Amino acid sequence: MSTNAEVVSAQIVLSSFWSPLPEKLPSITEAISSLSDEELAVLNTLSTFTTPLGGAAGELIAAPARENPFSF
């Protein structure tokens, strides 16, 4: 990065990934027909993790109120 009195220039590298959108989605009420062995292994691994402090996923924990939210 270089700088002048009024000009700043920099070189950056940007990596991005994408995937096409699915062409067909099943109904939300439709049961999952089958999982691959790899998906079952991931599911089994995830099920061994403990719940984070504060409760189940999706449960909100309110931070204590501060008179001035910008002071710690």
Image (tube, helix red, strand yellow):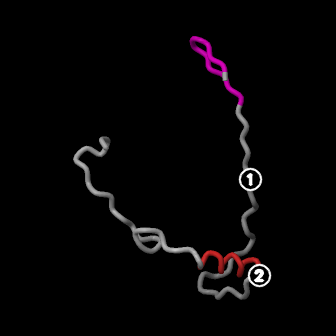
Which residue is depicted at the point 39% across and 67% down? 60
Which residue is depicted at the point 69% across and 75% down? 42
Q: Amino acid at mark 2?
A: Ser
Label 2: few (<14), some (14–19) or many (≥20) C-alpha neighbours in 10 Å: few
Depicted 56 relative to depicted 30: above or below: above
Depicted 11 relative to depicted 44: above or below: above
Depicted 29 relative to depicted 4: above or below: below
Q: Amino acid at mark 1?
A: Phe
Residue sitting farthest toward the top: 5
Mark before the other along the chain sequence, 1 or 2 = 1
Which residue is depicted at the point 59% across and 79% down? 47
> Which residue has dot 1 on it?
17
Mark 1 or mark 2, whichever is nearer to me = 2
Marks 1 and 2, how far apart at CA: 24 Å
Tell whether position 4 is magenta. Answer: yes
Residue 8 in the figure: left or right of residue 60: right
> Which residue has dot 2 on it?
36
Which residue is depicted at the point 77% across and 82% down? 37
What is the magenta range? 2-11
Q: Position of residue 70 (x, y in %)?
A: 32, 41
